[in-house]
Amino acid sequence: MKVLVVGSGAREHALTWKLGRESAVREVICAPGNAGTAPDAPAPSLDVGDPAALLAYAEAEAVDLTVVGPELPLARGVGDLFEARGRRLFGPGRHAARLESSKAFAKEFMARHAVPTARFRVCRSPDEALAAVEGSEFGFPVVVKADGLAAGKGVTVAPDRAAAERAVREAMVDGRFGEAGRCVVVEEHLSGVEASFFAICDGREAVGLPVAQDHKRAFDGDRGPNTGGMGAFAPSPLMSSALDRRIRHEIVEPVLEGMRRAGHPFRGFLYVGLMLTAEGPKVVEFNVRLGDPEAQVVLPMIAGELAPVLDAAARGALDGSVCEHSDDPHVGVVLASGGYPGRYDTGAAIAGLAAASALDDVLVFHAGTALRDGSVVTAGGRVLTVVGRGRDFPAAIARAYEAEACITFAGKHVRSDIGRKALSAARGVGAPA
Ligand code: AMP
Ligand code: GLY
């Protein structure tokens, strides 16, 4: 089959790499892509936020299966459009995508279907939200979330009432997130360790993938501003088969059942952002796509072919398919442009890519890169993800950092502690009771 991967990050490069080496895949195109996904050709220009443009491209290229990386086209209904035209796409329709595009929808859905999550209040006016944080029934810290898509910036963990009020005003009065902040969710703060659970869903059944852990903050020791993710590792040493069963039974199955009954079967990657609390796993957020950088460590762990599984899921016919995977630790380190997630420069020449890729047990995935006069230059905040594999976490970490050190560009920023949490978890530190 001919596959189109939509997007331009390292997640999409990892999808393109994985699908491109499978026997069922004749050709894979990544659009708009980056210097890694189309090393020998200019990346096709494509507006990922425009479902009609994606459909036109898939039709013109006679694509058999389209796999969508980012949430925006899904939230804009690309799934419905492809379905209406009888063209196969792996990703949910607009209604099911609201699990990610509206936090109020997701919370109310979880309440209706008894999915464990933080206690919350949906507030549709500033007065309502200010009243909710004033005598917070959830105590402090309290969490204030803009309802809509806010590029990862819509969540504030407010230590006290003043900070919570500020967050409410920014979202609902100052319009910092535009439409996305006209409604907010005020919720209980959960303590525990975060983990990312991914399932390939066909509307009825789900195939689980290895569980990963992300590193969201910009600097070592989980300090500094939130980013899209500075690194990830898998498998999470906090997982067990009992916990896996609980997540499927308490979270994934009710979501699939609830969506199916509502007439909007969920077909696509379901990303469950979990907090592993002392009381058990609770949902922090849903996303309707793979995570980035989690995908870069999870996809290389899949031993069998992924394309037939995605194709079956897109047809609503997983029929007991499984995804065999390795348990070897994988650690992915993000190389970012200095200043990210704030302002950063682009256009810096990148050296050492070939040396890094030549190392055993190393994969180099591109994100914000472009070709300029035949050389690869930086073109975004997150530039590359370098993934190391090892027999154990110390070996995987060492591989990833050895490869990372080969690559240089002006202003390069990396966290030096990616994967360290896996070591302490293995010693029993940070594991939920
Ligand atoms: P979200 O976009 O909902 O995933 O939130 C972004 C980040 O904010 C999460 O990854 C958590 O680190 C943090 N967060 C969100 N909700 C909560 C919560 N109820 N308790 C503690 N931390 C939270
Ligand atoms: N790594 C977090 C995300 O993809 O949303």
Image (cartoon, rainbow, N blue to C red):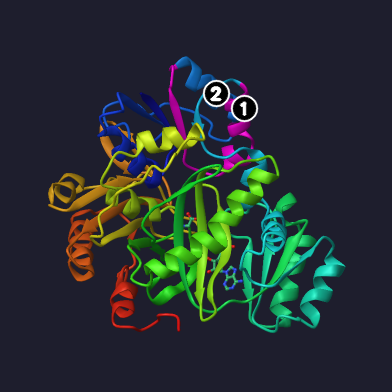
Residue 110 placement (x, y as % from top left): 66, 60
Q: Is residue 184 shown left or right of residue 372? A: right
Residue 89 placement (x, y as % from top left): 50, 31
Of 375 and 293, nearer the camera is 293
Which quadrant of the figure has residue 143? bottom right
Of 418 and 120, nearer the camera is 120
Mark 1 CB in 8 Å range of ligand 2? no
Q: Residue at x 56, y 24 (%)?
A: 53
Which amino acid type is shown beneath numbered disc 2? Leu
Residue 70 part of the magenta-drawn span: yes
Residue 239 placement (x, y as % from top left): 38, 69
Asked if marks 2 and 1 touch (Cβ < 8 Å), the reply is yes
Sequence-first disc among 2 and 1: 2
Which amino acid type is shown beneath numbered disc 1? Leu
Query: Dot 1: what SS?
Result: helix
Kindly identify which residue carries mark 1: 81
Residue 92 placement (x, y as % from top left): 57, 40
Identify the magenta region. 61-84
